[in-house]
Amino acid sequence: MNKNIITHICFDLDGTLVDSRDTILESTKLALDKLRIDYDIPEEVFTNMIGKHFVDIFEELKIDVKDFERFISIYKALYFDYIDLSVLYPGVEEILNYLNSKQIKVSLLTTKVQDQAEKIIAHFNLMEYFDHIMGRRQGIPVKPNPDPLIEICKSLHVTPEETLIAGDTELDITCGKRAGAFTCGVTYGYREEEILLKEEADFYIDSLDELILKMTSFLSTIGS
């Protein structure tokens, strides 16, 4: 009998459940405009950075944002003006409903601030599916630090060893590995596939409808 089981799946948000690249890009540009900050944001380069903290994104793009908290405040206020540019990836509701029906706990881990993460999930009418939503919070580090994932596990009374984290960036996979969880790389998101493959997740999916089959197949190979 296979002793390796997964009782909890933690999903990333942007690039995993929601295609929000246009919402993020337009909100970012308008917030910078309002602050009268000069910028050059190549769309493809920016897309490949989604998931990182804005501090790191601006540093890499050499955009000088002196009052970061002011930027975030404006960005958050503008975000929902562009929310209709975001869409769920195919299969999101189906997979969440399936996991609920199998009593597999479901959580969300995102670098978005807590209230924004909750509003986005509510906007897409997905709140009922989640046992825990973890956005960026004061005093808790962000991915790839494993602390937020460990905190989720504690709140759900599960161990990292029976947890799978699914996400489209190196931050998700590194976070999972450091926490001692299983990892699933999502290739349809914002990172180039060859970059994501270098992270050596336990397995990869090209669409959400592959998750259960790939997860089951993976677990069957790692012991009995």
Image (spheres, grey):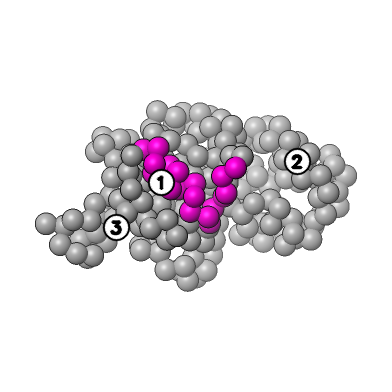
Badge 1 marks a residue whose secondary structure is strand
Residue 108: image x %, image y %?
46, 41
Q: Is residue 214 above or below residue 154?
A: below
Q: Could you tell me if residue 209 is visible in this image?
A: no
Disc 2 marks a residue whose amino acid type is Glu
Residue 138: image x %, image y %?
61, 39
Magenta part of the protein: which range? 139-156
Quadrant including the N terminus: bottom left
**Residue 107 placement: quadrant:** top left
- The Cα atoms of the two marked residues, 2 and 3, are separated by 41 Å
| Label 3 Cα crowd, 10 Å radius (few <14 / some 14-19 / many 20+) | some
Mark found first going from the N terminus, 1 or 3: 1
Badge 2 marks a residue whose secondary structure is helix
- Front-most of 141 and 58? 141
Quadrant including the C terminus: bottom left
**Residue 83 placement: quadrant:** top right
Mark found first going from the N terminus, 1 or 2: 1
| Label 1 Cα crowd, 10 Å radius (few <14 / some 14-19 / many 20+) | many
| Label 2 Cα crowd, 10 Å radius (few <14 / some 14-19 / many 20+) | few
| Cβ atoms under marks 1 and 2 closer than 8 Å | no
The numbered mark at residue 214 is 3
The residue depicted at 52 percent of the width and 68 percent of the height is: 195
Disc 1 marks a residue whose amino acid type is Cys
The residue depicted at 45 percent of the width and 48 percent of the height is: 149
- The Cα atoms of the two marked residues, 1 and 3, are separated by 16 Å
**Residue 85 placement: quadrant:** top right
| Cβ atoms under marks 2 and 3 closer than 8 Å | no
The residue depicted at 35 percent of the width and 63 percent of the height is: 202
Pointer 1: what residue? Answer: 10
Residue 100: image x %, image y %?
30, 35
Pointer 2: what residue? Answer: 69
